[in-house]
Image (tube, rainbow, N blue to C red):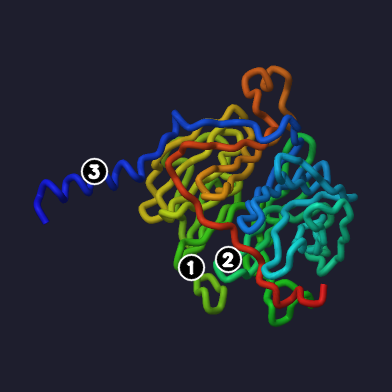
Amino acid sequence: MSVLKCIVLLNWAAMAYAVNYNEASIREVTDNVMVHGEGPFWDLENNVLYFVDISEHRVYRFYQNRLEHVKFDEDVSFVIPVAGQQGLFVIGLGTTLSSLRWNLNENTHKVTGLVTVDHNKPGNRWNDAKADNNGYLWAGTMGFEDAAGNIPPNRGTLYKLNDTGCFQNLDPILPGVSVSNGLAWNENGTRMYYIDSPTKQIVLFDYDPSTASISNRRTFYDFKTDNIPGVPDGMTIDANDNLWIANYDGAQVLHVSGSSAKLLGKLKIMAEKVSSVTFGGPKLDKLYVTTISRGVTPEKFNEYPMSGKVLEVSGLGVVGKPNRRIRGKCFRLL
């Protein structure tokens, strides 16, 4: 191959992976303002966006330009579909892992409690959760957050749903975390990225996909390195194995290399409290962003008018990976 042809190919590759942070189009998915929008999940099989409003106790779906929701009696922190079963989801309800039966084009729903954690920690609740590449559910808890946003440290735990014992109990993998948050795995499932928000760090584990186990914990990216304000919140990973991290109290989404931990760029958001992100759309080329309006003053709303909105970012030039459903072994009789 000629030198000129190599240069052309290299230039084309660079263009193909160029990211348009400043020229991307950001639109509000709906007019509704979420108090505590979180946990976006794009259902690629049905082209549906699911998310939650934690403090309003609601699970939402945005489907065919309709926004619908179901409401509960306590905080609901995540919603993830179960593989092989249409209309069946796992939700975090208070500190109870529950199933939600909510079929498309139906208004009725059914909730079944499966297992409760953190019995000796009143005020705790579930926070973020994800399924790994093989469908194993990882879900974490946190302590009670007061009106001022204060959270007692070290009261949360990162759990794993082991489908050998199913709902007899959940395996406590990482105790003593403060706000268990973002999770992501690389393409071959050998690396797991994890966020405990107050640490202001993303940590990296070696991951064994055959046993769904972690080892060799180390700091991967520290907000102090680039003087990033606020804390890391939810997180997703793109087709290039690079991370997209919601920057709570930072009004942006960070783009970080999944290999070198280099900060690749910042996507500015007109909401200070950015809570989570996921890729979606039929081509997985849109980034969905949830934000929070709780505690935002009128003055801050003027500065950050997208506070509380669920946002769709187009034109980034990046493609994501499909969100993983939870493996169905434990859910066949539900």
Residue plotted at (55% across, 67% down): 133
Q: Earlier in the sequence, mark 1 or mark 2?
A: 2
Element marked by disc 3: helix
| Residue under numbered circle 1 | 189
Element marked by disc 1: loop
Please tell me whether mark 2 or mark 3 is closer to you in this view: 3
The quarter of the displayed image where residue 213 is located = bottom right
Q: Earlier in the sequence, mark 1 or mark 3?
A: 3
Q: Specify the quadrant that holds the N terminus.
A: bottom left
Q: On residue 132, which mark appears? A: 2
Under mark 1, the amino acid is Gly
**Residue that lies at the very extreme toward the bottom in this rendered image:** 164
- Horizontal and vertical percent position of residue 210: 53, 78
Q: CA distance from mark 1 to mark 2?
A: 8 Å
> Label 1 neighbourhood size at 10 Å, few (<14), some (14-19), many (20+)?
some
Tag 1 and tag 3, C-beta contact below 8 Å: no
Under mark 2, the amino acid is Asp
Under mark 3, the amino acid is Asn
**Residue that lies at the very extreme toward the left in this rendered image:** 2
- Position of 10 compared to 65: left or right? left
The quarter of the displayed image where residue 64 is located = top right
Q: In this rendering, is residue 46 above or below 208?
A: above
- Position of 24 compared to 168: left or right? left
Residue plotted at (44% across, 51% down): 242
- Horizontal and vertical percent position of residue 37: 71, 41
Q: Earlier in the sequence, mark 2 or mark 3?
A: 3
Tag 1 and tag 2, C-beta contact below 8 Å: yes
| Residue under numbered circle 3 | 11
Q: CA distance from mark 2 to mark 3?
A: 34 Å
Q: Give the tally of numbered discs.
A: 3
